[in-house]
Image: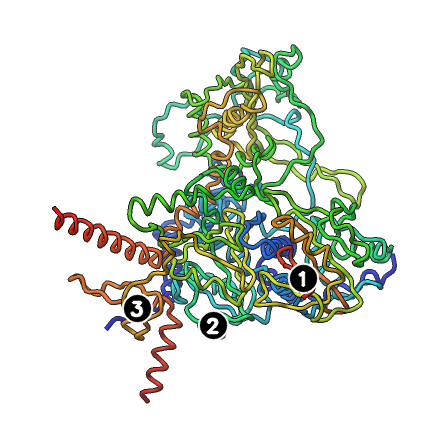
Amino acid sequence: MYVAVKGGEKAIDNAHAWLAEDRRGDPSIDVLSVAQIREQLSFAVNRVMAEGSLYDPQLAALAIKQARGDLIEAIFLLRAYRTTLPRFGTSHPIETEKMSCIRRISATFKDAPGGQVLGPTFDYTHRLLDFKLAADGDIEEAELASKPLDEAVPHITNFLNAEGLIQQEPNTDTEPGDLTREPLELPANRALRLQSLARGDEGFVLGMAYSTQRGYARNHAFVGELRIGDVTVEMDIPELGFSIEIGEVEVTECETVNQFQGSKTEPPQFTRGYGLVLGQSERKSISMALVDRALRWKELGEDNLGAPAQDEEFVLYHCDNIQATGFLEHIKLPHYVDFQSELELIRKLRREAQSHLQTQEAAE
Amino acid sequence: MSEYNFAYLDEQTKRMIRRSILKGLAIPGYQVPFASREMPMPYGWGTGGVQVSAATLTPDDTLKVIDQGADDTTNAISIRKFFQKTAGVNVTEKTAEASLIQTRHRIPEVTLREDQILVYQVPIPEPLRFLEPSEVETRKMHALEEYGLMHVKLYEDISKHGAIATSYAYPVRVEGRYVMDPSPIPKFDNPKMEMAAVQLFGAGREQRIYALPPYTEVISLDFEDYPFEASKADHACDLCGAENSYLDEVIIDDQGGRIFVCSDTDFCTSRQDQTKEEAA
Amino acid sequence: MNTHLLQGGFNAPPQDGARAFRSIMNAMARPGRIFDVSGALPPTPMSVACGTVILTLCDPETPIHLAPSRDIEEIRHWITFHCGAPFVRASEAQFVIGNWEEMLPLKQFKQGEAQYPDRSATLIIEEPEFRNSGAALRGPGIKDVQYFSLPTIAAFQQNAALYPLGIDFIFCADSQIAGLARTTRVSEE
C-alpha cells in the first residue's frame, strides 16, 4: 500500500547535521581557524568580499569556512548577511589617485612618474608545485624597498589626457544608482553597469572579456594601468558637520586604453575601459575593464556587432552568480506537478498522432 | 527571535514591497518592478513569494506553505519554518484554517474564501519570455498590447500537434488587458484563478510583483475552434477516490505499476478522514 | 519642535504596520469596501486613518505632496519626524494628501508611463465620512456591484478611461479607509 512520503522535516535536520560533520572532516586533523583563512587564503577572501559586495575580511573568511570552500556559497552567505545591515549613509567616492600602491604597472609606457612596481604577483612565478609548502616550510622575509612608494601616484591615463589623445570622461554630480535598492532598468547607465560588473561572477566576466579579445566585438585593449593598494574611505557625519575617515579598503583598479578609429560622432582617439574591484583581484578588474569598454559601443557611436559582450541586457542579467546558481539549482526542487501535466500532454499527442496514422493507413 | 525584525525583512524593505503590491492590485496582471532583496535562501527557491509573504503577514495570521500541492515537501517545510522562526505566526496544513497560503506550482482544490490570501512563488514572471528573451522588448510589447507573437506560438502548436502544447504556466489574459504568467501551475488550475481571495505573485530573482484582486477576470488564451481545456489525468484518486482533483502519478514497482493520488495532500487526507469517520 | 510631534507614531512599528497594511491592501483589492485602520495619532486636522496610511507606506523614498488644507507646519514636522518623506510639487508626488476639492484636476498628478503604469500617484483623500451607498462600482475586486459615497463620478470615469495609466485612491475618514483603483468602473447606479 502506497503511503505519501512524510518526514521531510526530519530529513532536513539530519542533512544539516551530516553537512556539519562533513565540514569538519577528519577530527584528528586540526580545526581550520577563520584567522588562518583570512591570512593564508586571501585571494579567496578577496573574491568573496568583491562578489559579496561587503568589505569585511573576517566575515568573508568565516563564510568560506562555513561554505567548506565553496566560494559562490560563501558569497551568498555574505550577500544575505549584507542585506540585513542598516545603512548609515554614503561615503565620498574613494580617490584611487591617492592610493598607497603595493603594485602598479603599465603596459603602455616603459616607465612613468611613480614607476613600475611589480608588487606581490604570481605573474613571473614558475607554476611548479612547491613541495616545501607541503612540508610546512616557513618563508624567508622579503626584502623591503629602500624607499617607499610616493604617496600619490598619478594615473597613467592622465598623461594621455594632457595631450588630448584619450576620450574625456565628463565629471558629473549625478548620484549613481544602487542596484541593491532599485530594480535594474534598461538601458542602464555606465555607473550601474560598472556596479553590476564589480559584483559579477569572476568566471562570467572573464569569459565575456576573453570573447572580446578573440574577436567578438574586439576592442584592442592595452592595460594602461593596473594598481593595487589601500585607499581611505571618508564619510560626512551630519552630526559633526564635516567628514571623517572611517577606514581603509584595499582595491584593484584597472584602466585600459583602447584603440579607436573614430566614429560618426567621435574623432579618432584612445578610449577607456574601467575596472575596480574590492580587494586584490587583477583578473577580475582587467576583465571588467574589457567588458565595460565593449558595453560602451552605443555612447561611442560604434556599430552593434551583435557580440554577447556588447549586449548590456545579456551581460547584466546573467553576470550575478547568486541569481544564476539559485535559479540553476532550483531545478533540483520537485517539479512533479508540472511533469505530470507534460506526461498527460505527451500521451494525448501520441494518441492523436497514432489514431491519425491509423486512419491514414485504413484509407490507403 | 530578537535578532531579526518581525518576518525578517526590515520595515523600509517591507514598505517598498507593500507599495509594489498596491500598484500590482491596481493594475491586475501588470508586473511591477521591485528592489528584491537577497534572502537567506537561494533565488529560484521562492524568494519572491517569501518577500511578498513577509511584507503581508500579520502576527494574527495562520500560515500554510505548499509545494506541488503538498505541505510536507522539503522546500515547503523550510519556508514554513523560516516564518515560524522569524514571525512567530501560527502554521497549519489545513487549507480552510489558513489565512495566508504560500504556494509553488498549485492552487488548493477547495475554494478559497474572501478572508484568505494566496501568494505564488514565480520563477519567470514574463509570459512572453520564451518567445522573446529581451526584457526591453517584452516591456514594449506589454505597453503596446502587442500579443500577436503569443497567439502565433499557440497557433503553431495546433498546426504542428493538433493541440496547444502548453500544459503548465499556461498564459492568461487579465481583464482583457495584460497577458500574465500564472506561474508554473498546471493548466488544470487556471480556471480557479477567478476567486474570492486576493492573489499575489512574487518573482524575487526577476524583481517583479504582480497581483489579482478577487473576482478579476482571468481568461486562458485559446481559439474558438480550439477552446482551452483544464486537463488532468483521466483517473480517480487511488487514496480518496476524488474524481475532480489534480493527480500525481506514482510509480510503485519496477513492473510499470502505478497509482494516481491527489497532489493536494490536505484535500486528500481530509477526504480519507471523512470516509473513516463515516465508516465508524 | 514641539514634543508632541515626536508622539503619535506606531507603538510597535512592525506589528502595527503589518496590520494596517492588511487593511490598506484589502481596501485596494476590494474597491469601495470600508476597513478599519489605526495605530497613528497625527496632528489635527489629519485623520487617524490618513496618518496610519502614511506611516505604513511612506518613507524617505516616497515624495509626498500636501494639498493646502494639510500643508500645515505641524503636519509637515510630524511626517518628517516619523517617516522622513520629502515634500514635493503635485506633479512629482508619489502620494498626495488632501481634501477632494483640492485634487482637481486629476491630471496634475503623475499618471504613470506606458511601460511603467505603476509610476503614478496615489491620492490619500480625507473625507468627513463615507458610506456604502451612492455611486455603483464594478470591476476587479468587486463580485457584482459595490456602492460607495464617492464625492463625484465624472473624474473617476475619466481616470478609468486612461487605463492602464491613471491614479489610485485611498479615502480616509476617522479610523476608516476605502480604496478605489483605476480599474474600477464608476456609474450613477
Residue A191 or A108: which is nearer the viewer? A191
Determine the secondary structure under disc 2: loop
What residue lies at 31% left-to-right and 63% top-to-bottom? B248
Near mark 2 (Cα within 10 A), the count class, few <14, some 14-19 or many ≥20, is some
Q: Position of residue A93 (x, y in %)?
A: 67, 33
Q: Name the residue at the front extreme.
A: A363
Q: Position of residue A113 (x, y in %)?
A: 62, 14
Q: Amino acid at mark 3?
A: Val
How many numbered discs?
Answer: 3
What residue lies at 61% left-to-right and 60% top-to-bottom? B5
Q: Nearer the viewer, mark 1 or mark 2?
A: 1
Near mark 3 (Cα within 10 A), the count class, few <14, some 14-19 or many ≥20, is many
Residue annotated with mark 3: B261
Gap between marks 2 and 3 measured at Cα:
21 Å
Q: Position of residue A103 (x, y in %)?
A: 55, 24
Is A267 placed left or right of A76 in the picture?
A: right
Is A356 placed left or right of A188 in the picture?
A: left
Is A304 placed left or right of A248 in the picture?
A: left
Q: Nearer the viewer, mark 1 or mark 3?
A: 1
Is A197 placed left or right of A150 in the picture?
A: left
Gap between marks 1 and 2 measured at Cα:
42 Å
Q: Chain of mark 1?
A: C
Residue annotated with mark 2: B92
Q: Position of residue C4 (x, y in %)?
A: 84, 63
Does residue C59 sit above or below A132 in this rendering? below
Q: Chain of mark 3?
A: B
Q: Are marks 2 and 3 on the same chain?
A: yes
Q: Amino acid at mark 2?
A: Thr
